Image (cartoon, rainbow, N blue to C red):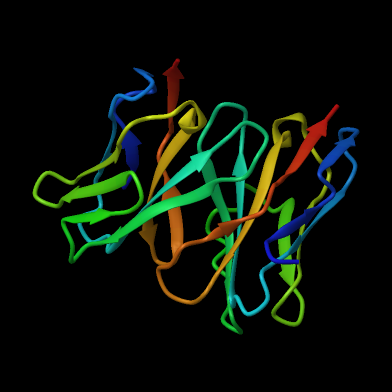
Amino acid sequence: GESVGLHLPTLSVQEGDNSIINCAYSNSASDYFIWYKQESGKGPQFIIDIRSNMDKRQGQRVTVLLNKTVKHLSLQIAATQPGDSAVYFCAENQGGKLIFGQGTELSVKP
Amino acid sequence: GAGVSQSPSNKVTEKGKDVELRCDPISGHTALYWYRQSLGQGLEFLIYFQGNSAPDKSGLPSDRFSAERTGGSVSTLTIQRTQQEDSAVYLCASSFPGPNEQFFGPGTRLTVL
């Protein structure tokens, strides 16, 4: 069946370094992708989204890249800070509902 | 309030009892979603309401699960005859129509003993 998944379950980076979190998707018809950040005990918080007619979108310290040829999505966080430590989920829009990946835990070392 | 609210924040129940979880979406959002998140896992879609259309119930795991949305606003997720495997965090989200950012509530942590 269709699925959205993440390559790495955990990622540990040094404070100040850049972080890259990857995601693979299998539904080539999907038209909308979104990244969420979830801290312990809280609901997911929107980070950035991208529609399928774009390859790249930038926010504050974050960039999402979409490669439709290989069905790959990535989230880049510049100058990673301790406050970025959380679980990051990619999600794919399918008929109005979001299908979430497994999640990657980002740990930032001071 | 400014965001999605859910109640209760925590619910402990005995196996076999029924539970009701409530979600208050952001005012003006016509779409409302329920997801379930087991410990250390991703979010599992349960049900999706959009305006007056019939809800998408394709994610409900069994007929013990049901949800209503009254007046296009507040929603209640009901789990009948709860089982231990129902223990999870139940998250509600709302959005404007179309593929858009979904705003999540803080969730209800359900524990079935």
Q: Is residue B77 above or below residue B109?
A: below
Spot occupied by residue B101 in the image (x, y as percentages of width and height): 46, 62
Report the side of B8 relative to A67 (left or right).
right
Residue at the location (38% across, 53% down)? A48
Q: Quadrant of residue B1?
A: bottom right
Q: Is residue A62 above or below residue B88?
A: below
Report the side of B4 relative to B110 (left or right).
left
Residue at the location (76% across, 70% down)? B74
Report the side of A75 relative to B8 (left or right).
left
Using the rendered image of the protein, determine whether residue A26 is visible from the camera's viewpoint. yes
Report the side of A30 relative to A9 (left or right).
left
Number of numbered discs on residues: 0
Give the camera-side residue of B49 and B64.
B49
Spot occupied by residue A93 in the image (x, y as percentages of width and height): 37, 59
Q: Is residue A53 above or below residue B38?
A: below
Q: Residue furthest left?
A: A69
Q: Quadrant of residue A79?
A: top left
Spot occupied by residue A60 in the image (x, y as percentages of width and height): 36, 50
Residue at the location (39% across, 23% down)? A9
Q: Quadrant of residue B34?
A: bottom right
Give the camera-side residue of A53 and B70.
A53
Spot occupied by residue B6 in the image (x, y as percentages of width and height): 76, 55
Residue at the location (69% across, 66% down)? B2
Using the rendered image of the protein, determine whether residue A1 is visible from the camera's viewpoint. no
